[in-house]
Structures are given as C-alpha cells and as structure tokens.
C-alpha cells in the first residue's frame, strides 16, 4: 500500500472545479442523507451532509481523489465524517490517548490550531460499486451517528459518572441481544487470513491474527515480532452495548509517554490519508509505553463478512504504522 498522501494527478483546486460526482456516489450520498430526516437544520447536497448529532454538528463530505493505489486500483473519492468537539480542548495528548480507548467508529484528533474533532474516513475505489451500495453506505451513515458515543463514554468513565451513559440509555438497535457476529464470521475471516499467509486462529467468539513486524516474521510463539489483532464478540462496550470490538496491538515498547505522541501522529496520519485503510476507530494508549488501535462496531453495524474486512484493514494498518513509527522515532 502506498502510504504517501500526495499522490494526485491534478491540483486540488483544478480537481474540485471540474469534478462531477459519479451517479453511484450521488446515490450513496442520498441514501446516507436519510439519517438527517427530521432535522430542519440539516444541509444536504450530492457531496456533503451536515446535521445535528447528539448536541454536535456532524459533516459527511465526499471529495474527489484520483489516485492509483499500489495494487493498480483507482481511488476515485474519499469520504470523511467529522464531528467538531470543544469538551476536551483543555486535555493534552496523554489524556486524549486515554479517551480514545473508548472509541467506537472515530478518533478524537487535534489539529494544528488546537481544535478537536471526531474523525472517520473511507477511501472509495472506483471498482467498488457493489461495496459502496451494499456495505459502505450503511457503514458511513451509522458510523456518523455513533460518533458522539465514544467521547461521552470516556467523559463518564473519567468523571466517575459511568451510569449517565449506559447502553440502555443510548439504546442502539440490538444493544441488549448477543452479538450478531458468530462463529461463521470468525472462521471465514480465519480462512481469508491464512490464505494470505497470516498466522491466525478462530473460535466461536473471536479471531486472533498476527501480522509480520519484521521481514519473515510469522508468530510471536516462534520468537518473531508481530503485531497482534484480537477481534471479540463477547466484550460489550460500556456505552454502546453488544457488538464487535477489535484491538491491534503493536510489538513496540516506547519510552515513557512516547506512545501518547505516536497515537496522535498515527491518528492524524490516517485521518488525512488517501491510500490508507478505512479509518473507523482510534489509536490510543493506556500507559504511554504501548500502542493499540481500537474500534467497536455495535450490532447496528452488522454486515455479513465484516470481520474479514476489519482484519484485512488492520493488516494494512500494521504495515503503515511500522513505516510511520520508523520515521518518527
């Protein structure tokens, strides 16, 4: 995967001036816009939707890209979900890295001007017309609706008011029934991973997979350095209820507090990326010496085959993290 964010064929101003969104994208954006029904303040066009969302204003914007990925496929558009925040502006990188441990579908990211926002992104390949209609449209819409839950949950955990943002109060569809992701999902993902040379194991409630951190690495059991992906269907989110949690842990021991800075760097990098995996989750750190990417999909986001998608995205994410961290340290 090409991790450069500068690979464009025309200048940004020229591209935006001549761009006409293709019909498949327009149809997807119109379908996504149904989440804003009843919001009289919503602003909706074929390429942008802004609506009221849990006391915040969330914007879903599609922009033209025009980048050829390293595999030769054409990235035609990029969709970003952004929800500005003010509640955490007094916090430093350490506190934000801890808050992001409770992420669902987006990361809290601070820009160069000190402004915070929850961000999710998705590159759209031109050939992915079926995925755009059958997977990404619902994922983008519901991921946007879920943006406030992670920060609200974190605020409750930090202040000791966990009972104020419970799954029952959030009341997402399917929050109180067992996870929709079952043994079939994990075995299918396991087969996909193994077919690609990844050491992986599946059980009725989850999947583990190891991604090489060094050339030729296979498994930590053999003494190799690998990043570890764990996907579980039996760990509810404290504010979103039942669903699917995933954690990608990197095999790097940082100096004291260095992981907090690296979490912020990786979140900004992925949030601004083009040829990067779908960004639904957040880089975070509990102790400042280890680094983890975490995300949570409640039952509301269930789609058959998504465990395999998440595992594939995390394999790419591990490779990118290795390159970015190598440049940072």
Image (cartoon, grey):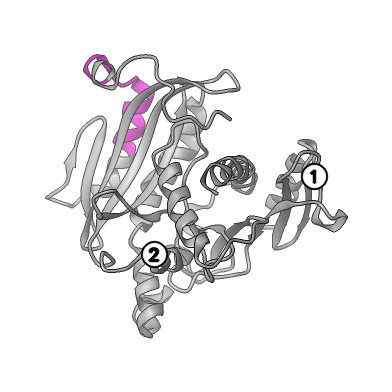
215 with respect to 232 (left or right): right
In the image, residue 158 lies at what x, y percent?
39, 79
Q: Which residue is labeled 1 in the image?
A: 217
Residue position for label 2: 96
Q: Is residue 29 magenta?
A: yes
Q: Which mark is residue 66?
A: none
Q: Position of residue 273 (x, y in %)?
A: 43, 36
Is there any visible trace of residue 298 in the rendered image? no
Q: Is residue 103 magenta?
A: no
Tag 1, which secondary structure? loop
Which badge, 2 or 1, is on the more N-terminal residue? 2
Estimate how packed mark 1 is, as few (under 14), some (14 to 19) or many (20 or more) residues with alpha carbons within 10 Å: some
Q: Assign the N terminus to one quadrant of the image.
A: top right
Which segment is the magenta one?
A: 16-31
| Residue shown at the point (33%, 41%) measured from the top left | 32
Q: Main secondary structure of the magenta part?
A: helix
| Depth check, front residue: 260 or 182 | 260
* Residue 14 in the image: above or below residue 111: above
């Amino acid at each position: 995967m090409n991790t450069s964010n500068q690979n464009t064929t025309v200048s940004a101003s020229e591209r935006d001036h001549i761009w006409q969104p293709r019909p498949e994208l327009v149809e997807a954006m119109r379908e996504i816009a149904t989440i804003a029904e009843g919001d009289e303040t919503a602003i909706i066009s074929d390429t942008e939707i802004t609506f009221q969302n849990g006391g915040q204003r969330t914007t879903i914007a599609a922009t033209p890209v025009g980048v050829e990925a390293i595999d030769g496929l054409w990235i035609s558009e990029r969709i970003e979900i952004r929800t500005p925040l003010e509640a955490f502006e007094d916090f430093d990188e350490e506190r934000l890295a801890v808050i992001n441990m409770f992420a669902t579908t987006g990361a809290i990211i601070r820009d160069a001007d000190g402004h915070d926002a929850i961000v999710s992104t998705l590159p759209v390949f031109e050939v992915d017309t079926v995925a755009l209609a059958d997977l990404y449209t619902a994922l983008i819409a519901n991921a946007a609706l879920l943006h406030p839950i992670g920060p609200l949950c974190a605020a409750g955990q930090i202040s000791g008011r966990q009972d104020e943002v419970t799954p029952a109060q959030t009341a997402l569809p399917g929050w109180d029934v067992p996870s929709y992701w079952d043994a079939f999902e994990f075995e299918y993902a396991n087969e996909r991973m193994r077919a690609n040379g990844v050491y992986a194991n599946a059980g009725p409630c989850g999947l583990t997979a190891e991604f090489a951190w060094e050339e030729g690495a296979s498994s930590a059991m053999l003494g190799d350095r690998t990043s570890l992906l764990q996907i579980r269907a039996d760990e509810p989110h404290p504010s979103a209820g039942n669903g699917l949690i995933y954690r990608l842990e990197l095999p790097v021991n940082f100096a004291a507090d260095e992981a907090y800075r690296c979490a912020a760097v990786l979140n900004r990098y992925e949030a601004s990326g083009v040829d990067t995996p779908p960004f639904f989750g957040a880089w975070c750190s509990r102790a400042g010496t280890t680094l983890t990417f975490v995300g949570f999909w409640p039952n509301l986001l269930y789609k058959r085959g998504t465990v395999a998608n998440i595992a594939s995205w995390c394999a790419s994410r591990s490779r990118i993290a290795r390159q970015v961290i190598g440049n940072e340290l």
